[in-house]
């Protein structure tokens, strides 16, 4: 029997809980860094599996109200992978060939920019600098597409990966809560609720962010495709894809996405370029003043300035991939910090 002097008090358990959260976060950062350097494909596989769990879990919960849990999981997975197969078909048949054509024609867009009336009125050094900025911006936009789509294609191109992702996602959706309950048995009774609240908050924040970003991404891609079709611009699929994927790099990505479309329009006429630029500006304002605060801002609750700094930092450290992961990392870090500093988590006798 443990004496009162050796028994761990609730206050000590509270301190121990904070230490555990801190160690978990450091371990997570270290593990992700090691996988990024030595096993990037495995990191992408685990990320995709977690992403699918976060996206499909609410659907599985709804379907489970009228179906058995196992059937609900299978139905959600078959529906998702059916849509994914159709999307991949469109990407391979239409978008990738158009993207290659856009890259081939890019020098001609720069030539049209050089010969435009506004550019001819500027000093030569400004023109040269403007050309370099445009080249870097378009390369950045194309890199966003490559870093978003190509790693996923490579991940699903192997037989093992094609089997592993649906398999792992199925068991996470089916037995995820059982796994969490099994882990909770090793925790002191005082901290079971904290454990559930901590990971529950992470799930809510990441789920809200990912679903919100996907909504904005789909909306932006559809509107840009429709606008490009109305304006009669070529490469409508490419411009739509660039706009859609660029939304996953908040603020910076959406600004960068305006350049390719405006350059293409400028190859026809300055007036059309002005109309297209105005179209992108209106879309950007609608997204960031109306849609983004409601569907994403409520989930992450992080100031835009801090988001911008984090995106630039992650971009410097990890390139385009880091920029894509910057906001989710900030969202998880915020949850971790709240649970680490929340004084209400220390139970008093």
Image (cartoon, rainbow, N blue to C red):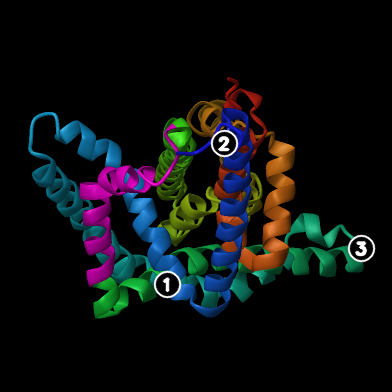
Question: In this rendering, would 233 be left or right of 315?
Answer: left
Q: What range is drawn magenta here?
A: 163-189
Q: The residue tagged with tag 2: helix, strand or loop?
A: loop
Residue wearing tag 1: 42
Upstream in sequence: badge 1 or badge 3: 1
**What secondary structure is the stretch in magenta mostly built from?**
helix
Q: The residue tagged with tag 3: helix, strand or loop?
A: loop
Instruction: Specify few, some or many for label 3: CA neighbours under 10 Å numbering under 14, 14-19, or 20 or more.
Output: few
In magenta segment, residue 164: yes
Instruction: Specify few, some or many for label 2: CA neighbours under 10 Å numbering under 14, 14-19, or 20 or more.
Output: few
Q: Nearer the viewer, residue 322 or 109?
A: 322
In magenta segment, residue 190: no
| Quadrant that contains the C terminus | top right
Measured as percent of width and height from the top left, residue 52 is found at 33, 52
Q: Is residue 277 above or below residue 40?
A: above
Q: The residue tagged with tag 1: helix, strand or loop?
A: helix
Q: Which numbered dot is residue 62?
A: none
Residue wearing tag 2: 8
In space, the residues marked 3 and 2 are separated at their CA atoms by 75 Å
| Figure quadrant of residue 301 | top right
Asked whether residue 129 appears in the rendered view, the answer is yes
Question: In this rendering, would 63 be left or right of 313?
Answer: left
Residue wearing tag 3: 123
Q: Nearer the viewer, residue 202 or 223?
A: 202
């Amino acid at each position: 029997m443990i004496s009162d002097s050796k028994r761990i008090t609730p206050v000590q358990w509270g301190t121990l809980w904070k230490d555990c959260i801190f160690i978990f976060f450091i371990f997570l950062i270290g593990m992700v860094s090691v996988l990024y350097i030595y096993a990037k494909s495995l990191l992408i596989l685990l990320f995709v599996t977690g992403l699918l769990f976060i996206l499909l879990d609410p659907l599985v919960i709804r379907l489970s109200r009228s179906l058995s849990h196992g059937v609900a999981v299978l139905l959600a997975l078959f529906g998702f992978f059916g849509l994914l197969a159709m999307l991949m078909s469109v990407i391979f048949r239409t978008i990738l060939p158009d993207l290659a054509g856009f890259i081939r024609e890019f020098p001609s867009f720069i030539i049209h920019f050089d010969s435009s009336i506004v550019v001819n009125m500027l000093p030569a050094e400004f023109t040269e600098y403007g050309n370099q900025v445009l080249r870097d911006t378009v390369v950045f936009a194309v890199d966003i597409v490559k870093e978003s789509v190509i790693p996923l294609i490579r991940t699903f191109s192997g037989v093992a990966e094609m089997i592993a992702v649906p398999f792992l996602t199925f068991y996470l959706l089916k037995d995820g809560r059982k796994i969490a309950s099994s882990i909770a048995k090793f925790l002191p009774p005082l901290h079971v609720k904290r454990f559930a609240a901590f990971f529950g908050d992470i799930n809510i924040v990441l789920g809200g962010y990912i679903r919100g970003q996907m909504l904005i991404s789909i909306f932006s891609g559809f509107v840009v495709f429709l606008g490009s079709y109305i304006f009669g611009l070529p490469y409508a699929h490419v411009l739509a894809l660039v706009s859609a994927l660029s939304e996953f790099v908040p603020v910076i990505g959406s600004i960068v996405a305006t350049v390719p479309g405006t350059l293409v329009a400028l190859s026809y006429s300055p007036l059309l370029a002005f109309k297209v630029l105005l179209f992108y500006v209106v879309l950007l304002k609608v997204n960031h003043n109306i849609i983004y605060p409601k569907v994403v801002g409520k989930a992450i609750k992080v100031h835009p300035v801090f988001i911008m700094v984090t995106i630039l930092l992650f971009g410097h450290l990890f390139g385009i991939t880091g920029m894509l992961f910057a906001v989710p990392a900030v969202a998880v870090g915020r949850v971790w910090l709240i649970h680490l500093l929340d004084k209400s988590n220390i139970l008093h006798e």
